[in-house]
Image (cartoon, rainbow, N blue to C red):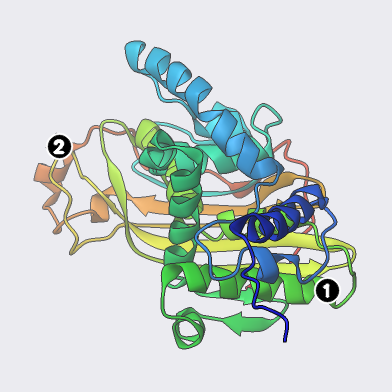
Amino acid sequence: MKPFIKRSNSSKKTRKSRKTQKKRTVNLNSAPPFYYSRYYKNTHTIPKTQIIHYLLSNYKPYLQYKKKCDESNTIPLQLNECFLYDASYFPKGLRKNQLRFSLEMNKKTPLDKLIAYCFYIKQPTIFDKDTVHALEDVKYQIGKDISRDDRTINDKERNKEYYHDKASTNYSIADVFYQNVIDEMKSYTHQIDLNVVNKCALLSCQNVYGLITDLFTMQINDMLEPERNTVFRPEKHATFIIQPSQLSVEYHFKTQMIITRDGEPFDPEYPCGHLEFTLHIDLLKNKYFISEFAFDYDIDKCGPEKDMSEQSKSKKFKPEYMLPATAVSAGIVAMPFILPLL
């Protein structure tokens, strides 16, 4: 009988190092369909593709830029740095108005930068940590936000209940989403671009809605000055299209708006505005645009009704004037919908 020989730890390390080496040499832009489930499922990390390297490497430069912005009392990202428009799109001094237009992408802020700023501005503490813990926090946040929102992937409804039924932790919920996207991709290709899959996951975070909505409300604040506004009971839904000739995300956002009236406090009993926009992101072309923006408001309805004498004394805006949609949207290049309307 041959004596029992215990395998040394060195042999185990060798097998582990070979597995790790294989993982590192795979091109993450054209990985086999099983790659994510084999190396990232049931872990706290995600593939370090180009978008992840961008997030990690540009955070310190962002902090330096933000410091300069703070010193000059400005903000690191404004609406006109993301979209092209002029002052006529947001006319000032009107107590009542209806805005309708589309917005093209400003190349000053490419898609990767927009994704990064969604995290830098809304959740900066994630990247104050080392790489390992930063990626853990990113995956945790992906799973957390996926379980809080509703979305459609190639006409398949993937709502909050779906993910809660499939997984029990935020990390495992993220795994289910990654596998959903990969399964759609592998139906037409055997080469999975994990950088695109990462972008789909990052774009599923509420940071995207949060930042874009903040940019619009800040612009509206400037338009309605000295009045202020805030969203009220927002509704949102995302649609993912994953096909050979189309990889895109469409966000539909609509909300009532609460606006101050003549310097009075916000009154949630009198929402007096309505904001709605559709944001398209084309992952094949790395572009984004607003296909439809709509904002209606009436300052006089932002609180209980006043008598005419009191109202005339308190008015700080110009007389009511309805700006035609054609005047607001003049000069805008009409852009086709990438995705079907929600």
Q: Residues within 10 Å of mark 2 (few under 14, many from 20)?
A: few
- Front tag of 1 and 2: 1
Q: Is residue 327 above or below residue 109?
A: below
Which of 32 and 92 lies nearest the eye of the viewer?
32
Percent across and percent down for residue 300 are: 25, 50
Label of residue 94 in the image: none
Percent across and percent down for residue 309 are: 10, 44
Q: Tell me the residue at 42%/80% (across/down).
A: 168
Amino acid type indicated by mark 2:
Ser
Q: Is residue 296 above or below residue 240?
A: above
Amino acid type indicated by mark 1:
Lys
Label of residue 314 in the image: 2
Res. 327 visible in picture? no
Q: Is residue 323 above or below residue 183?
A: above
Q: Tell me the residue at 51%/85% (across/down).
A: 166
Picture quadrant where residue 176 is located: bottom right
Marks 1/2: CA–CA distance: 63 Å
Please give left or right for residue 279 compared with residue 323 in the image: right
Q: Tell me the residue at 54%/70% (across/down).
A: 42
Residue identified by numbered label 1: 186
Q: Residues within 10 Å of mark 1 (few under 14, many from 20)?
A: some
Tag 1, which secondary structure?
A: helix
Q: Are marks 1 and 2 in contact (CB under 8 Å)?
A: no
Quadrant (top left, top right, bottom left, bottom right) of the N terminus:
bottom right
Picture quadrant where residue 179 is located: bottom right
Tag 2, which secondary structure?
A: helix
The number of callouts visible is 2
